[in-house]
Amino acid sequence: MKIPEKNIYRDLQIYSRNMQKKPSSPRQPNFPPGTDSVHLSEKSREILKIKNLLHAVPDIRENIVTEIRTKIEEGNYEIDSDKIAVSIIKESLLHDIEQIIQSEFSIL
């Protein structure tokens, strides 16, 4: 775009005046210092407490890992296939029930 030279000085003056009128940074509301506060609901405090407790729980329970590792190394670790099968079926049924509830009630 070409700017006609006859108006360039006038345009620069207008631009300069407009820039001088505008504040250099956005205006901050005039609140007295120290009046900011945050109020958390009881529910949010509970959630925060639970979150902190969960972070304190280790991802790996070393005592159980050590116990199983020792049994495997000594050849004493027994696998209960019935217990595993029941757990798999139970987990599958719970998953199916959850899917039914989600589709029927759209709550989860």
Image (cartoon, rainbow, N blue to C red):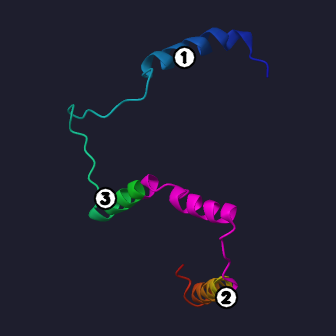
Tell me the quarter of the picture where residue 84 sits. bottom right
Residue 14 — which label? 1
Q: Position of residue 61 (x, y in %)?
A: 52, 59
What residue type is disc 2 on?
Asp
Is 80 included in the stretch rendered in magenta? yes
Q: Quadrant of the N terminus?
A: top right
Reply yes or no: does residue 68 show up in magenta: yes
Residue 25: % across, % down: 44, 24
Given this view, does label 1 or label 2 mark the residue nearer the observer?
A: 2
| 63 left or right of 96 in image | left
User: Closer to the N terminus: mark 1 or mark 2?
Assistant: 1
Looking at the image, is 102 positioned above or below residue 7?
below
Residue located beneath label 2 in the image: 82
Mark nearest the camera among 2 and 3 is: 2
- Rendered position, 4 above or below 54: above
Instruction: Characterize the magenta stretch by its predominant secondary structure.
Output: helix
Q: Residue at x 27, y 63 (%)?
A: 42
Specify start and end residues of the magenta stretch as a single range: 54-81
- Nearer the camera: disc 3 or disc 1: 3
